[in-house]
Image (tube, helix red, strand yellow):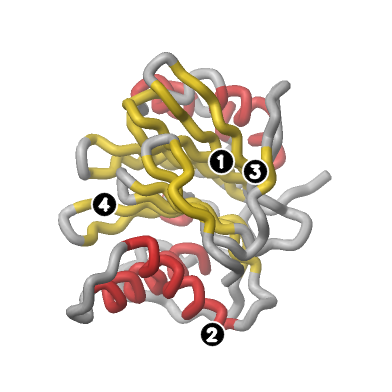
Amino acid sequence: MYYMCDIIGLSCNEEDRLTRSLPLFGELFSRGHPDGWGIAYFDGSRARVKRAPGVAVENNLFFDTIKKARSKNIISHLRSGTGGNRCEVNCHPFARPYNGRDWIFAHNGWVNNVERHPDANGDTDSEQIFHQMMDHVVEYAGDGAIRGTYPAVKQAIKRMFNSYGRDIRLNFLMSDGNMHFAFSHYPNKPIYMLHRVKGYGGAILLSTRMFGSWNWERIPKDRLLAVNNGEVLVLSDKI
C-alpha cells in the first residue's frame, strides 16, 4: 500500500536517542519513500538537521545521524514528493529561528496554491506552510498580550484553514526544543502516540505508522496535541 510521506517524533524528559525505533521505522517504510529523508534534533536551543534525497536505509548518513541525535525532541521524515524537485532542500524537517530558539517542522500531506515564502530555501508546499505558520505564531505571540506558544500554534492552524479551506491535508510534527506539537488532518492517515516508561521517566513517540509490538493510541483528528518532556500537556478541542 502506498502512503504519502511518513513522520516520527520523540519527546522525553531527558536527552535520549531513537536507536531502536528509528532504524526499524526506516527499514519498514523508507523504501516506499524514494524522494528523501531527514532527521532533526536539538543541541541546546539550536536545531541540528541532516537531510538527503533518496531512500533513507540506503544512505549511511541516516544511520550515523541516528547515533548522534541525542535530544529531548527529535523529528524524522520520509519523503514521497507531491511537488518540488528531488533534492536536499526539499527534504523535511525544516528549521527556523524564533525568540532565541530554533523550531523544527515535518509535514505529511499537501496544500495547493501556496505562494512561495521569502524565507524558504526549497519549493515544496510543506516548507511554505511551515513559514506561514511561523509568521502567524510570531504575530499572535507578539501583539502585547500574555500569550504562549500553544495558543499561537492553534491560531496558526486556524489561519491555514481560513486561507486554504479544510480540504487540505495537514499532518505535522513541530517542536521548539521544549514543546512538541502534533496535529492530524488527513483522512485515513492518522498520527499515533506511544507512551513509554524509561529509567529516567516518560517518553512519547509520535508516528504516522504503527509498528513494533507496542500499544499505539490514535490522536483524535483536528485536535492539537502538546507534549512537554515526555508527558501530554494538553489536547485541544476540535480546531
Q: In the picture provided, is 112 more to the left or to the right than 9?
A: right
Residue 91 in picture, x, y percent from top left: 48, 50
Q: Earlier in the sequence, mark 4 or mark 3?
A: 4
Q: Which mark is residue 162?
A: 2
Question: What amino acid is labelled 2 in the image?
Answer: Asn
Q: Nearer the viewer, mark 4 or mark 3?
A: 3
Q: Label 3: how many residues lie within 10 Å, few (<14), some (14-19) or many (20+)?
A: many
Query: Would you identify the image quadrant in which residue 133 lies?
Result: bottom left
Q: Which mark is residue 102?
A: 4
Instruction: Check the image and report above or below for 103 versus 111.
Output: above
Q: Label 1: how many residues lie within 10 Å, few (<14), some (14-19) or many (20+)?
A: many
Q: Tell me the distance, in whole angstroms, between the alpha carbons under discs 4 and 1.
A: 20 Å
Residue, disc 1: 206
| Residue 191 visible here | yes
Q: Tell me the distance, in whole angstroms, between the alpha carbons under discs 3 and 1.
A: 6 Å
Residue at horizontal 34%, vertical 23%?
68
Q: Tell me the distance, in whole angstroms, between the alpha carbons under discs 4 and 3.
A: 25 Å
Q: Tell me the distance, in whole angstroms, between the alpha carbons under discs 2 and 3.
A: 26 Å
Q: Earlier in the sequence, mark 2 or mark 3?
A: 2
Residue, disc 3: 192
Instruction: Check the image and report above or below for 59 versus 144.
Output: above
Give the secondary structure at mark 3: strand
Q: Earlier in the sequence, mark 4 or mark 1?
A: 4
Residue at horizontal 64%, vertical 43%?
192
Query: Would you identify the image quadrant in which residue 33 lies?
Result: top right
